[in-house]
Amino acid sequence: MTSRPLLRADRVALNPIPWINVKADPDDPASEDLWLFADPAFRADYPRVLRAIRESGFTATMMEVLDTQTLFDYRRMVEDAGLALAPGYASVALPEDHGVLFEPASAEGVRWFDGVRRKAEESLFFGLDTVFLAPEVSWAPAALRTRDAAAIGAGFHAGRLDRVIDGLGRAAEVLAAEGVRAGLHNHVGTWIETEEEIERTLAAIPPSLLGASFDIGHLAWAGIDPAALIARHADRVLDLHVKDLDLGIAADTRRTPTPYRTATDRGVFREPGLGDMDIDGALAALPEGWDGWVIVEVDRATMAPEASAAASWEWVAARL
């Protein structure tokens, strides 16, 4: 059995996603999925959510400034909750997925990365120098990796992957120019989902521009050994997202094509320690002296958000 690795109390955070990624009717699995970060009305509830994170035991949360608030407003909110901030998340869309085409040096090509620039600005404002960088998670009608078949590399196309890698490389350059280092963030449902896609991306973009900020749950969902991948790229690992999984459900989705949201509704995501993953084994693969962030992220809580946060903190507290 893997011994428990030690975590630094000042380098562990909670993503508020248990409060954000919810069903319209919690008692009806078939009800609409809500993403409350996109709802302007969530601004009024955000302070309560941040206070609940602090009350659960966590002293830091993942940076997520709402589109409808200023940096100063967000800073007041976080300070009032007594929290510190951990690195945030940036994503880059593939233009062709949105039906657009432009030259990289054109005004449209430059502005395509405005969201990345905004994430750099937010990070630097709060004293953060790393960010999770991922391809877009698309829910468009033709997005087969979310709509039809998650976690199996559906519709792989080498040329498209090259274009995705090019976009990530350009985004990493934008971040680096501002003093923020990007870490590749794998995510089921994106064009960088499988081990081959991850390896090709890391091989194509130099470590000076792109580190590795893996999500160990999304690795395992795609059938990848998190410990082996972390060990292989130990010199590039900047930060991690940590969650648990029901590995039986994950394996079922790889055998039978399953939409992303169907897997989520079936309960593939679990709080740390409540699933089947060897999370301790993955963390033990980190190099000695590693001082990156570990952000607990339960994409869909299995219980009320406050209880989910408390269960996650209980798992963390046993490893401090």
Image: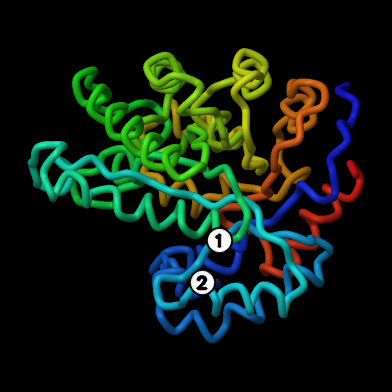
| Residue shown at 59% from the left, 23% from the top | 236
Residue on which the image places disc 2: 71
| Residue shown at 29% from the left, 48% from the top | 113
Judge by depth and name the residue closer to the eye, 140 or 253. Answer: 140
Judge by depth and name the residue closer to the eye, 248 or 216. Answer: 216
| Residue 202 horizontal side relative to residue 280, left or right | left
Q: Residues within 10 Å of mark 1 (few under 14, many from 20)?
A: few
User: Measured from the top left, where is residue 238 in percent x and y?
Assistant: 62, 33
Q: Residues within 10 Å of mark 2 (few under 14, many from 20)?
A: some
The tag earlier along the polypeptide, 1 or 2, is 2
Residue on which the image places disc 1: 125
Marks 1,2: beta carbons within 8 A: yes
Judge by depth and name the residue closer to the eye, 26 or 108. Answer: 108
| Residue 314 horizontal side relative to residue 108, left or right | right
User: Measured from the top left, where is residue 95 in percent x and y?
Assistant: 17, 43
Which quadrant: the C terminus? top right
Q: Secondary structure under badge 1?
A: helix
Vertical placement of residue 215 versus 285, above or below: below
| Residue shown at 46% from the left, 77% from the top | 69
Cα–Cα gap, marks 1 and 2: 8 Å
Vertical placement of residue 71 versus 189, above or below: below
Vertical placement of residue 43 versus 237, above or below: below
Amino acid tagged 1: Phe
* Res. 32 image quadrant: bottom left
| Residue shown at 30% from the left, 54% from the top | 114
Vertical placement of residue 293 versus 154, above or below: below
